[in-house]
Amino acid sequence: MSHREELANLLRTKSLVRGEITLSSGKKSNYYMDCKLTTLDPEGALLTGYCVLELLDEMGVKPDAIGGLSMGADPLVTAAGVVSAIEKRPLPGFLVRKEAKKHGRQKQIEGMENPRGKKVVIVDEVCTTGGSTQEAIDAAEREGCEVVAVISLVDREEGGSEILRQKYNYRSIFTARELLAEDSTSARNVSGAASH
C-alpha cells in the first residue's frame, strides 16, 4: 500500500467527522475534517511528510523551504521537514504568524532568515475558501519569496482551490470527495459546531 493510500485510510478513520458543523467561513457542512487528529499522530505525521514530498516530486518542484499559516500548516511543515531529513534531502520549514510579533525581532515569518529570493511552497491542511492559504502566500511574497507551489492536504472543492489555481501551482493530496467516497463505516458523528 502506498503512503497516500495509508494516509487516506488514517484520515477516514481518525479525522473525518460526520454531523452538522459550522466552518470558519460561516458555511454549514455535514462533515468536518479534523486533520490534526491524523497529522499529529506519529504514523499520520510520517505518512503526511512522505505524501507532501512525493507530491512535490510529482509537481517537479524543488523549493528552498516549506511553510504556511500557523497553526493549520504547523504539522505538515514539521512532518515534511523531518521526512526530508530521513530521506537525506533536507527541506527547511517556516511558519507564518497571523500578524507580526510586537516584541523581539517583530517577525511574521518564523524559521527562515533572509527570505528574499527563496523559492517556497505554501501548505495548509484544508482548503475551503483558500483564505488562510492566501494569507500565508501574501506574507511570504511581502518578504520577497517566490511561491513555486501551494499544497493542501484536503481540498473541500468549495471554490478556494479554483481561486488559488488561477495564480499559483496548486495541488491537493486529497479531495474531500475521494475521502468521503469510501467512508461508509469509518467516520465518527459529532454534535455541535467546530471551526474550520
Image (spheres, rainbow, N blue to C red):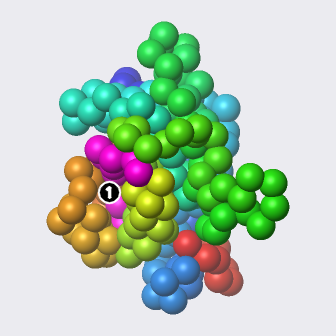
What's the residue at 42%, 64% (across, down)?
138
**Which type of secondary structure does the marked residue at label 1 adopt?**
strand
- So how many labels did they put on this image? 1
Q: Amino acid at mark 1?
A: Thr
- Above or below 18: residue 118: above
Quadrant position of the C terminus in the picture: bottom right
Residue sitting nearer the eye, 182 or 92: 92
Q: Residue furthest top?
A: 88
- Location of residue 137 by image quarter: bottom left
Q: Is residue 184 left or right of residue 55?
A: right
Q: Is residue 150 left or right of residue 125?
A: left
Quadrant position of the N terminus in the picture: top left
Residue sitting nearer the eye, 103 or 44: 103
What's the residue at 55%, 17% (across, down)?
85
Q: Is residue 133 visible?
A: no
- Location of residue 103 by image quarter: bottom right
Residue sitting nearer the eye, 136 or 126: 136
Spot occupied by residue 14 in the image (x, y as percentages of width and height): 60, 50
Spot occupied by residue 122 in the image (x, y as percentages of width and height): 42, 49
Spot occupied by residue 98 in the image (x, y as percentages of width and height): 62, 67
Which residue does the numbered mark 1 point to in the structure image?
A: 175
Spot occupied by residue 12 in the image (x, y as percentages of width and height): 49, 51
Provide the residue span drawn in magenta: 144-156
